[in-house]
Image (cartoon, helix red, strand yellow):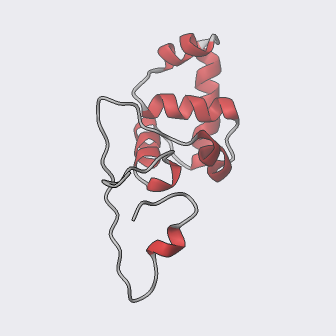
Amino acid sequence: MPTTPGNFAELSVVGHPKVAVYLTDPEEPAPIAIDTLMKVYNLTEREAKVAIAIANGRDVNEIAEMHHVSVQTVRSQLKSIFNKTGVNRQADLIRLLLGGPMIYETCHTPDS
């Protein structure tokens, strides 16, 4: 059964165990849903974009260049992201963002 942000209740029906398998291509950026990320962690759109860029392996300098802002601005945004998500390091942020299904944009099944 594919999972989406709205159907987690279906995955936890008592007495009916379910399993979820998440496959990703390490060569492709993680399909993180920006709207869900903003809602779940109360991030601004720019903070969510920075978080996604970090999860996809970008460094602070690359993000600053991509967004046409200073490195200090990106560092400030990261500090705010850490506060809102409850993590202290970029590695922890990456684990948080890539470790669960609720933020993924799409789900693919063999039938889709």
Q: Is residue 95 above or below residue 102?
A: above
Instruction: Report if residue 79 is visible in the image.
Output: no
Whole-percent x, y for residue 10 in the image: 49, 74
Q: Is residue 23 above or below residue 51?
A: below
Looking at the image, residue 80 sits to the left or right of residue 61; the answer is right
The single residue placed furthest to the front in the displayed view is 111
Measuring 29% from the left and 29% from the top, which residue is drawn there? 27
Q: Nearer the viewer, residue 29 or 44?
A: 29
Q: Is residue 2 above or below residue 35?
A: below
Whole-percent x, y for residue 93 in the image: 47, 41
Whole-percent x, y for residue 31 in the image: 46, 38
Measuring 40% from the left and 45% from the top, which residue is drawn there? 95
Number of marks drawn: 0
Q: Nearer the viewer, residue 59 or 19?
A: 19
Q: Nearer the viewer, residue 1 or 23?
A: 1
Measuring 46% from the left and 82% from the top, which residue is drawn there? 13
Looking at the image, residue 48 sits to the left or right of residue 18; the answer is right
Looking at the image, residue 39 sits to the left or right of residue 94; the answer is right
Q: Is residue 57 above or below residue 38?
A: above
Quadrant that contains the N terminus: bottom left
Instruction: Report if residue 21 is visible in the image.
Output: yes
